[in-house]
Amino acid sequence: MTALGLLHPGHFAEDDYPRIEQLLGSDIRVDLVHTDPGEDVRRVGTLLETGLLERLVPGTERLRLAGAEAVVWACDGAGFVRGPQGAHEQVRELALAAGMPASSTSFGFVHAAAEIGVRRVAVAATYPEDITDLFVDFLRAGGIETVAARSAGAGTAAEVAGWSEAEVLALAREADAPSAEAVLLPDTALHTAAHIPALEKDLGKPVLTANQVSVWEALRLADRRVNAPALGALFTREPIVQV
């Protein structure tokens, strides 16, 4: 059994994680601990407060006692708004407090893009434009070029959590560009776990979403690679060739 620990602000789209756990198989457990999200407003200042260590550290003890092998801060915006250096400091302090490897959804996107071998992406973001721009900057620092971006301008996580599959697909289509090798949908408040196959079929390319990437990043830290095609290209491993 591999136990993964996720710190998740609030209760938005949390049901994505049991779905992902089920698709991964019986020997993977995803433990979710909720942190204090503070005010539900999509502004830089509030996102910085959401990611304060004093809000995150208390949850690490619960994950440690549950047997988690790695911890991921599963809140995209409250990671990348700090910039690459601030986000590195955030996960470093989280690892020290938790006593286990740590990362965040923001770094998960960078590592996942490398995993599937893409360098040029389209960003389909629910955020206001200024927050989307900070995500694009974060990706650039990780060696990923954003060739197109779309900001939906949603002001709260509660609003995003109520989006339908049709709304998610519409945003992805609007953001996509022919030169993009993959489409990225940040925001862990957005339900995407059930929509990834449909998104990839419609767009004809890999799709990386925040909740999908959060769990994949935790698996990467735990040194597990899982074949789960229902979770998209990121979880589709090449078959072993026997000679």
Image (cartoon, rainbow, N blue to C red):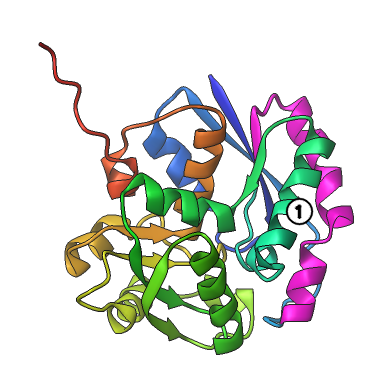
What residue lies at 72% left-to-right and 48% top-to-bottom?
Answer: 91
What residue lies at 35% left-to-right and 68% top-to-bottom?
Answer: 121
Extent of the magenta region: 44-71
> Was residue 47 drawn as part of the magenta stretch in this picture?
yes
What residue lies at 67% left-to-right and 81% top-to-bottom?
Answer: 42
Q: Nearer the viewer, residue 91 or 119?
A: 119
What residue lies at 42% left-to-right and 49% top-to-bottom?
Answer: 112
Mark 1 is surrounded, within 10 Å at the Cα level, by few (under 14), some (14 to 19) or many (20 or more) other residues, namely many
Vertical position of residue 73 compared to residue 179: above or below: above
Vertical position of residue 189 compared to residue 41: above or below: above
- Can you name the residue that lies furthest to the top here? 243
Question: In the rendered image, is residue 9 in sight?
Answer: no
> Was residue 238 drawn as part of the magenta stretch in this picture?
no
Vertical position of residue 206 compared to residue 185: above or below: above
Residue type beneath disc 1:
Gln
Vertical position of residue 228 compared to residue 191: above or below: above
Element under disc 1: helix
Q: Main secondary structure of the magenta part?
A: helix
- Can you name the residue that lies furthest to the right here? 54
- Position of 197 with respect to 147 (left or right) is left
Report x, y in % for residue 143.
46, 61
- Position of 131 with respect to 26 (left or right) is right
- Can you name the residue that lies furthest to the left here? 243
Q: How many marks?
A: 1
Report x, y in % for residue 116.
32, 48
Q: Nearer the viewer, residue 236 or 36?
A: 236
Q: Please identify the quadrant where the C terminus is shown.
A: top left
Residue 102 sits in quarter: top right
Q: What residue is disc 1 on?
A: 90
Report x, y in % for residue 105.
57, 54
